Image (spheres, helix red, strand yellow):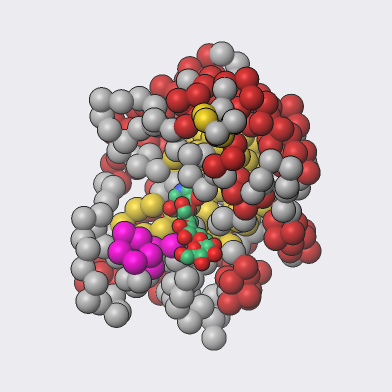
């Protein structure tokens, strides 16, 4: 059994230490969550399709339970996510058998944001308001989503405005992945800069941090944090995991990580936390996209059923040695 100090208590003066949770890990990792994390994010349960499966139907049962769990254990709660191209019910984009018109889509988006942000006003300290609207392709700025097809880029600022009206105290983030890639980083920076110039209430950038033991480089991570922070907004690490595989590695034969993988992960995690501490004045929270290696979305991505070991707690809920080192080095 673990004899290490609490992860979040160690960093309480610097930033929150968070985890994404779901109904399964709330049980399987309950002790680890209670002891080591002071911020929680619902992995899927506050997404559009979970909360709002049809126009006149909301389902808050599971998200309410998570918020109550957070309150009971004095954990802060983040909200993920209000406007996204993925896991969003088809009905919102449909009207009379065709594509919805712009006015109607904007009304529906507002109604959703009003209802969800309003319900959790004061209970959720930070929302991922707009998620992943920047394109990965170098020659393209915005992702070509239904939101974009119907509304152009205008939905982005509207989403922030609506969310801010409903909960003026919540920290509102733009959230994205590949956030440390130089080309994408510049576009994210441009987007948030333009929003700030228009006085849109955007308060931070969420760096998802789906990283691995090789990529991205520390230099690119540093530059990303610096660039976003230079806009005068908060930076949050919102979905961190450190995969044992390079992005293009599709091997499926490993049932345990190799010693080399483990050593590289240890080294990387130590360096990441050195960087986070270096920029602690700009970073509000560091959230992992899960708790322990028994469950991660990476077990199904990019290869269905392939094991991965991306966290600081192993599949038996035990802290890895590197967590010990992170806590000692602080
Ligand atoms: O709920 C159904 C279940 O009823 C069904 O039997 C099962 C069969 O596959 O699927 C279940 O839905 C899955 C859902 O997670 C809940 O477990 C979906 O297939 C699966 O695609 C979905 O994956 C989620 C993914 O977002 C979808 O985009 C992952 O859990 C979640 O970790 C992941 O999180 C995203 C962030 O929201 C945004 N940033 C990237 C990050 C990783 O992709």
* Pick the front one: 116 or 6: 116
* Pick the front one: 124 or 233: 124
Residue 108 visible (yes or no): yes
Residue 200's x, y, as percent?
60, 20
- Find the magenta span and give its range: 297-304
* Pick the front one: 211 or 255: 255
Q: Residue furthest bottom?
A: 1
Q: Is residue 194 above or below residue 32?
A: above
Q: Quadrant of residue 157?
A: top right
Residue 223's x, y, as percent?
34, 35
Q: Is residue 14 above or below residue 252?
A: above
Would residue 159 be counted in the magenta stretch? no
* Pick the front one: 266 or 289: 289
**Residue visible at 28% across and 41% down in the picture:** 219
Q: Is residue 8 above or below residue 51?
A: below
Q: Is residue 325 left or right of residue 243?
A: right
**Residue visible at 60% across and 45% down in the picture:** 48
Q: Is residue 150 above or below residue 118?
A: above
Q: Residue furthest top?
A: 198
Residue 230 visible (yes or no): no
Residue 57's x, y, as percent?
73, 47
**Residue visible at 26% across and 29% down in the picture:** 138
Residue 232's x, y, as percent?
53, 26
Q: Is residue 298 left or right of residue 289?
A: left
Q: Is residue 82 left or right of residue 165?
A: left
Q: Is residue 103 left or right of residue 143?
A: right
**Residue visible at 28% across and 47% down in the picture:** 216
């Amino acid at each position: 059994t673990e004899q290490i100090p609490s992860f979040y208590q160690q960093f309480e003066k610097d930033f929150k230490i968070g985890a994404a949770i779901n109904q399964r890990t709330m049980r399987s990792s309950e002790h680890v969550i209670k002891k080591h994390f002071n911020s929680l994010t619902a992995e899927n349960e506050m997404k559009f399709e979970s909360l709002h499966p049809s126009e006149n139907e909301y389902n808050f049962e599971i998200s309410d339970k998570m918020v109550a769990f957070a309150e009971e254990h004095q954990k802060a709660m983040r909200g993920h996510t209000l406007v996204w191209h993925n896991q969003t019910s088809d009905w919102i984009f449909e009207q009379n058998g065709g594509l919805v018109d712009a006015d109607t889509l904007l009304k529906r988006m507002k109604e959703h944001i009003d209802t969800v942000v309003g319900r959790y006003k004061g209970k959720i300290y930070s929302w991922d308001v707009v998620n992943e609207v920047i394109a990965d392709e170098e020659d393209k700025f915005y992702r070509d989503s239904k939101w974009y097809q119907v509304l152009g880029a205008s939905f982005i600022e509207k989403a922030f405005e609506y969310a801010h009206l409903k909960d003026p105290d919540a920290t509102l983030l733009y959230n994205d992945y590949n956030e440390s890639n130089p080309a994408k980083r510049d576009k994210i920076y441009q987007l948030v800069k333009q929003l700030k110039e228009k006085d849109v209430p955007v308060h931070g950038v969420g760096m998802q941090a789906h990283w691995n033991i090789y990529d991205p480089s520390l230099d690119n991570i540093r530059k990303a944090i610096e660039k976003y922070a230079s806009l005068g907004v908060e930076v949050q690490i919102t979905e961190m995991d450190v995969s044992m595989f390079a992005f293009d590695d599709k091997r499926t034969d490993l049932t345990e990580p190799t010693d080399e993988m483990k050593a590289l992960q240890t080294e990387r995690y130590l360096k990441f936390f050195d960087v986070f501490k270096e920029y602690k004045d700009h970073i509000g929270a560091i959230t992992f996209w899960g708790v322990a290696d028994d469950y991660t979305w990476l077990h199904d991505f990019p290869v269905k059923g392939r094991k991965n070991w991306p966290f600081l707690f192993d599949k038996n809920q035990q802290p890895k040695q590197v967590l010990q080192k992170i806590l000692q080095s602080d």
